[in-house]
Amino acid sequence: MHWLITGSSSGLGRTLAETLLAGGDTVVATARDPHAVADLAERYPGSALALPLDVTHGSQVRAAVETAVAAGPIDVLVNNAGHGLLGALEELSDAEIHEVLAVNLLGALAVTRAVLPHMRERRSGHVVQLSSVGGVVANPGHAIYAASKFALEGASEALAGEVAPFGIRVTIVEPGPFRTEFLGRSLGRSTPIPDYAGGPAGALRARNADAHGRQPGDPVRAAEAIIAAVRAPSAPLRLPLGRSAVERIRAKLTAQLADLEACAAVAVAADREAR
C-alpha cells in the first residue's frame, strides 16, 4: 500500500512511517522540515519519499500531494500533523488560537481536500484522521486543542458519509496519552493568569509536566493498531487507543446518555406538534 503521512518527523507519525516501511509498504513522509524525515528515504530507497509540507501553506499542500500522486496512487492518507496548547480559554491569545486551529483543523482539512479527488477518481482510499481522546472529552485547560479536535471529528464524521459511495473509508483515531513528544517540545503553553492556577486548568498544567516521558501508551502498538484497522475489511469510524482513552470516552458517553434521558421529555415537548 502507498501511504501519505503528515507530521512524520516525530511521535505517532514517525513511528507509523517506520513500522510501515519495515513491513514493505511505501510511504510519503512529510514534515515542515524535510531534513527531519530525510533519513527514512536514505534507509528505504525506493519505498520512502521525504517531502516538505507545512499543512498551513496551501501551495505546499498542493505540491506535496501532486508529488506523492506522481510517485504512486495514494491508498491511505494519515493526517497526523498537529500539537497541543495548554491554557484556559481566557489565557489564550488570538495568535495562539489561530495557530492551533490552522494546523490541527484547517491543515488536516486542506490536505484531505487535496487528496480526495485522486481517491474519488480511483473509487478507493482511506483517510485516517489523528484526533485524540481530547476530541471526545474536553479537559479544562486544553480548550482550544479540544475545539480543534472536536471540529475535526465532526467534519470527518460528515466526510465518512459523503465519500462512502466512492469506496473511500474514514477512520478517526482517538489516542490517550502515548510516550511521544506531545507533552514535551511539541506542547505549547499560554501565559498563565494567576487566578486559574488553583483550579482545573492549573492542575492540568501540573499533571502534564509530571507525565511527560511516563505516558502508558506504546507508539509502536498504536501504529500497529492503526495499520490493522486500515487493512481490516470493515474499519471502525472511531478508533480509541489506550486504556485511558477507552475509560474516559466510555464515562463521557455514559454521562451524556444519562443527561439525554433526563431531559428527553422536555426536549421532545419543544417540538411544535407536541403542544
Image (cartoon, rainbow, N blue to C red):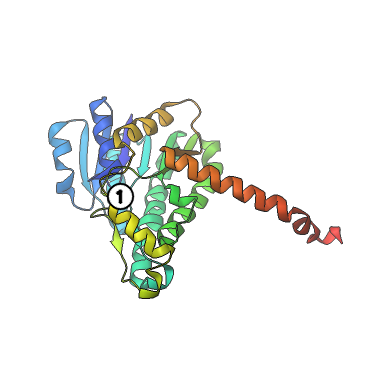
Q: Mark 1 — residue?
A: 211
Measuring from the top left, give residue 205's x and y in whole percent: 34, 60
Q: Residue at x 78, y 55 (%)?
A: 265
Element carrying mark 1: helix
Measuring from the top left, give residue 237's x and y in whole percent: 51, 38
Q: Residue at x 44, y 53 (%)?
A: 149
Q: What type is the residue that disc 1 sits on?
A: Ala
Q: Quadrant of the C terminus?
A: bottom right
Q: Residue at x 33, y 53 (%)?
A: 82
Q: Could you tell me if residue 129 is visible in this image?
A: yes
The quadrant in which residue 41 appears is top left
Tell how many labels.
Answer: 1
In the rendered image, the residue lying farthest to the right is: 275
Measuring from the top left, give residue 101's x and y in whole percent: 39, 61
Up the image or down, 142 lies above or below 178; here it is below
**Residue toward you, 248 or 76:** 248
Up the image or down, 103 lies above or below 64; here it is below
Answer with left or right where residue 45 lies relative to residue 211.
left
**Residue toward you, 176 or 146:** 176
